[in-house]
Image: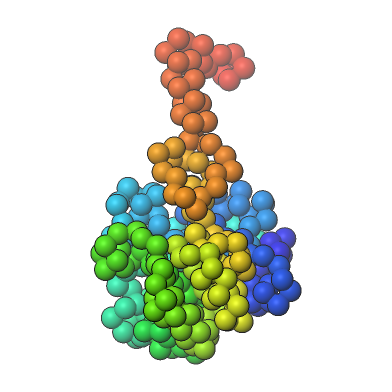
Amino acid sequence: MSRSLVTVATIRDAKRLNRRVTMLTCYDATFAKLFSRAGVDLLLVGDSLGMAVQGHSTTLPVTVEDILYHTRAVVRGRGLVGPHVVADMPFMSYQASPTDALRNAGRLLQDGGAESVKLEGGAEMAPTVERLVSAGIPVMGHIGLTPQSVHKFGGYKVQGRTESDADRLVRDAKALEDAGAYAIVLETIPAALGARITSAVSVPTIGIGAGASCDGQVLVGYDLLGLDPDFKPRFVKRQGNLGMEVAGAVERFVAEVRSGSFPDDAHSYGA
């Protein structure tokens, strides 16, 4: 999908065409260029940058200004064609009122260059989603484990294990669909529930720890690449071990500088 500019319509049509959607979090221009060349459909400028980039223990400290900064970089790296760029709405940028949400989402599109926004929450957020969509701002929903509610959940725990919780998440998904969300992220829920929600809605579901029946999958780009050897949640399948490669490359650089073998004539300028 990503050899031309991927749009909301492209993503929405993917479910009808039975074509799986791919999404990775992305925080800078270099990775945006690499992920785009590899054919990823969506780049999510996630508030996960709070943990992956800033070193926080949760996503809660991330601000709209942080998301704006990283979104601009990702859009520049993506170029004129390639993946659809989604900007996360950080904690307290949309929960207080639909008016706050509209103002902040508008900034992410107008100032950041994003093409849609993602926000967390189910039926309680449907009026906000409807307000944004009616203003011309495409919205991706996010239910299940919603990291901005980590303190409410008491940690990063699997959601929807009980029948009542599963029924509520199905209702949440339908409410987001009715409000106009063009896709819904399903995070850390039983695979059977992921399949149930995917069948219950006509918009694509994008899973992260939600089983193989979702219409697409998303991972944190750094996790996929194995940049942090110490972090490996169950739902992550590493496609690389770049953390070890980076450490090895830097160790070789340090050794060559200290031994005097770098720079050599091949890496120096003549008269």
Foreground of the two, 249 or 121: 121
Which color mode does the image show?
rainbow
Closer to us: 195 or 179: 195
Q: Quick check: can you spot residue 177?
A: yes
Residue 260, above or below 247: above
The C terminus appears in which quarter of the rendering?
top right
Q: Is residue 117 left or right of residue 78?
A: left
Q: Residue furthest front?
A: 163
191 and 18: which one is in front? 191
Left or right: residue 96 versus residue 4 is: left
Whole-percent x, y for residue 202 in the image: 61, 82
Image coordinates for residue 233, horizontal then vertical, percent: 44, 49
| Residue located 67% across and 74% down the image | 15
Q: Residue 133, can we see it?
A: no
Answer with left or right where residue 35 lies relative to residue 161.
right
Which quadrant holds the N terminus? bottom right
Q: Quadrant of residue 67?
A: bottom left
The one nearer the camera, 104 or 204, is 204
Residue 66 point in image, percent of width and height: 36, 60
Q: Position of residue 255 (x, y in %)?
A: 45, 15
Residue pictured at 30% horizontal, 59% vertical = 155
Residue in view at x 51 percent, y 50 percent: 236
